[in-house]
Amino acid sequence: MPPLPPELIEHIVGHIRTQASLKKCCLAARAFVHPCQKRLLATLSLPVAKPSRWKRAVTHFEQSPHLALLVARLNIELDWDVPEPGAFAAVGPDFLAQMAQLKGVSFTSNTTGVVSWGRMPAPVDVALTALFLDRRRQQRPLDYVTLHHVSDISSRALSLYIGACKRLRFTSSIAAAHKPEDDNESFEGGYGDQPVTSISLRYTSTVARRLGDTQPLRVCLPAIAFLTLSGHDHNIEDLLPAYALLAPTIPRIELPSMYDIALDDAKAYALPTNWPALRVLTARFTANELEDSPPWTVTQLIDTMLQPEACPQLSELVVVLRVKIDDSEYYDDEDEEDEDDEDDDEDNEDGDEKEEDDDDDNDGEEEQEGEDDSADEDTDEEPARKGTQSASAAERKGPFDSTLPIAFAFNPATIARLDTRAVSHPTLASLCWEVVIEFKSTGMEYEGMTYTPHDVEKAKVQYVACCAALKELMPEMVAKGKLAFRSRDPEP
């Protein structure tokens, strides 16, 4: 029997679900050994609380060096309970650097809360330093480095990640407090001439503050290709110094939404006015923000970032617009309904008595007046535009019709200013609205821990209506052919 093609064997192994089954499959035939080893070692998880795992990995790689080349993802689990550094004596400086095909590294907390970066064993820290420096010197950045629930991240650690990976993501992590001695420390160079690292900060504005207040970290800033921040109530004063330092070199940036930042109403804040390298700018708004008086983020986009002298190379503007729709049915309070019924009964009794006293002509006039009043009340309760409905269940006072668009009421003056600024920018080639339709009935319901998938067909009706409303208010960009739209599913 001729041997099976390697592609077919890899396809078969790809359907094996458990590690135990993969290990058994390795023993079935020599042809299955390498494909099974690739699956087994594709993700290597090493908890710092279990040095025996590290020692076993060191032994395997020493006996079979080719196995280190199969590791694509490395997960390091931090823990408050860490053995003595001597337990990691087997971990040499080149232990991680030998994983030449490594794509990414994740640091996670092995407990319910955050774990300090200081709990990293010294030999492991040395091996990580060698890995990141090696990737920077060779200009072979990792695809990603993520830190989840990690605290006390040192400035030196931050300097190692930047330039050594393409995507650097912090989630619910905290940078170490700035110390005067940090400014005297020298960090390793080798960042290259081109920005390579995109930074995502989620509930982690302290990292942005470290970039701004630690002098040696400033040599890393030209290596940052993109910065985005999300979360809730980040102090804008943590971000503005970092923006000021990144403005001269960063090519892409995403401005935070009003939900993400906290402003002191008694103070005046402004973004930098000089972004010579910025080519792609992303801003995030909600539909409500564009219907009311423009908030700080909207005015900064229009009055600062879209000035030609502020961003002379800007070629693309992306506006992520979140449209939140309450598609639940509205129910009036039962007591209010009872009171309304009683009032109606009293009105009917009064009307009966009055009819007995008045003549037929007066009856006709009163009936006509009653009809006119009723017509006025019905008109008041109708949506602002015929054939639409409200996005608010309380205003709608009835079931949500999935075939009927909501009444978009964007502020004409705000959108007109955006239209004028965008069309007059000499290098701006495209303004793209990324419309995210979110329904209250879909997504994660945390109380019952249930998830309802996003309804694409239901959202399409609202997406089309939203695009039509924006097109109507931006005639100049439409005429230039520079206005684009795309739909985007909400985050799960």
Image (spheres, helix red, strand yellow):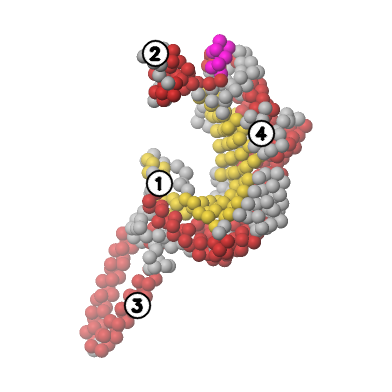
Q: Which residue is mark 4?
A: 163
Q: Which residue is mark 1?
A: 454
Out of 280 and 44, give the one closest to the viewer. 280
Residue located 42% across and 21% down the image: 5
**Outermost left residue:** 356
Dot 2 surroundings within 10 Å: few (below 14), some, or many (20 or more)? few
Name the residue type under label 2. Answer: Ala
Q: CA distance from mark 2 to mark 3?
A: 86 Å
Residue drawn at the location 61% of the way across and 39% of the way down: 199
For the point 61% across and 19% down, the residue is 98
Distance from disc 1 to disc 3, alpha carbons, whole Å, reads 43 Å
Disc 4/disc 1 C-alpha distance (Å) = 37 Å
Mark identifier at residue 373 = 3
Task: Name which residue type carries label 1.
Answer: His
156, above or below 250, in the image: above
Mark 1 or mark 3: which is in front?
1
Residue 168's image quarter?
Answer: top right
The residue drawn where x is 39% and y is 62% is 389
Is residue 146 something one can see in this rendering? Answer: yes
Q: Which of pointers 4 and 1 lies earlier in the amino acid sequence?
A: 4
